[in-house]
Image (cartoon, grey):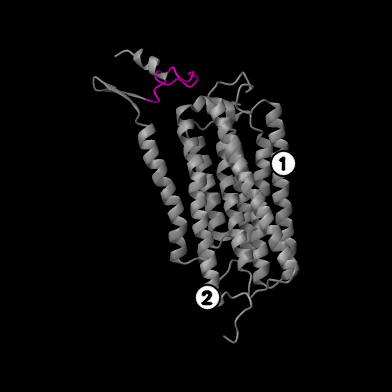
Amino acid sequence: MADAHAALQEQFEEMPQQKEAATLGMWAFLATEVLFFGAMFMSYIVYRTTYPQAFAEASHHTIVLFGTINTAILLTSSFTVAMAVHAARQNNIKWLFRLLAITVFFGLAFLAVKGLEYHEDLNENLWPGPHFKSELPPQAQIFWILYWIMTGVHAVHVTVGVVLLSIMAWMTSRRKFSDAYYTPIEISALYWHFVDIIWIYLYPLLYLIHRYSA
Amino acid sequence: MRTASKKSYVLVWIALLTLLLLTWGLAEINLGPFNNVAALCISVAKMLLVVLFFMHGRYEKALTWIFICAGVIWFLIMVDLTLSDYLTRGDVRDGVSTSWHHPQVNPPTLQPGTTRELQHQIPR
């Protein structure tokens, strides 16, 4: 083909077809991720319906301010990465790089706040086991096990996203992308939005149970 | 390809932050069982905003939507089948069912391992 883009792989006829396949592949991966996190949400639902009071008491020991700040950070980072894709579409490579860098910064800020929060949680003896905070009912440990696993696995996903978007920023600085080819940016952004959506559910489920009675 | 405008991204971002403050605010008020309903509805609304606008779901074809729905529907099947077990556990004696969630069967601060014993103490 005379007008073939350098990034066109041989198994595809044309760029739009390649882009469609890549995007659909990312959505398929995200569907498997929904089920991966789904199993943890399922455990949460079963144990919370079984021990509602213990979960409410346990939840009062989460640090709502950190959780809320982190939700705002992730929602904003979703906005900046959506703007990055927009900039790529407009062939505005300078802003594409800046917006990716800003998104990476927000991702790191999220992890930093999460680290501070983990530190406080550990100081409060909220790690399940023999030294678990004694004034809480034993079932509160189930809440805290789910808290550490779910936020931990989510933090791993944020880390992967930060690495992915850093690579995208680096490739952008190497002039790999233009309005004719920015599929990697677009599907990395899809992944980042997914990580944001998981947090959208974790926030009320972990931080806001029976807040009014705290 | 049709695309969202810069303005729509800004509006969605403002809407998301507003919904975040709304969830936080509502959690501080006692609405009884509607606290959970409100929190989940707001989360679903936030998710839809992100999927439809930020992830360009509005402009995706039916094939993509099949993939999007697949994850959600299979998750709901898992929730449905699992809860149809857990929510209906318990005994049926003399035509009266004693739910797994009955406070006498399963008090919230019950020590693990004592469930069985306690079940036998329930007056028939």
- Disc 1: CA contacts within 10 A as few (<14), some (14-19) or many (>=20): some
Give the residue drawn at x 59%, y 45%. A199
Question: Circle 2 sits in a helix, a strand or a loop, which is it?
Answer: loop
Chain of the residue under label 1: A
Residue of label 1: A113
Q: Outermost residue toward the left?
A: B94
Q: Can marks 2 and 1 be said to lie on one chain?
A: yes
Q: Which residues are magenta?
A: B100-114
Taking B6 as reference, is A109 above or below it? above
Which of pointers 2 and 1 lies earlier in the amino acid sequence? 2
- Disc 2: CA contacts within 10 A as few (<14), some (14-19) or many (>=20): few
Give the residue drawn at x 55%, y 63%. B56
Membership of B91 in magenta stretch: no
Residue A208 appears in view: no
Quarter of the image for the C terminus of chain A: give it.
Answer: top right
Give the residue drawn at x 48%, y 22%. B108
Residue B104 appears in view: yes
Amino acid type assigned to the residue bearing label 2 in the image: Phe
Taking B24 as reference, is B102 above or below it? above
Disc ID at residue A12: 2
Question: Circle 1 sits in a helix, a strand or a loop, which is it?
Answer: helix
Taking A182 as reference, is A195 above or below it? above
Chain of the residue under label 2: A
Residue A18 percent location from the top left of the image: 54, 72
Between A95 and A123, the residue placed more toward the observer is A123
Alpha carbon distance from label 2 to label 1: 43 Å
Badge count = 2
Residue B120 percent location from the top left of the image: 34, 14
Q: Outermost residue toward the bottom?
A: A2
Amino acid type assigned to the residue bearing label 1 in the image: Val
In this picture, residue A18 sits left or right of residue A179: left
Quarter of the image for the N terminus of chain A: give it.
Answer: bottom right
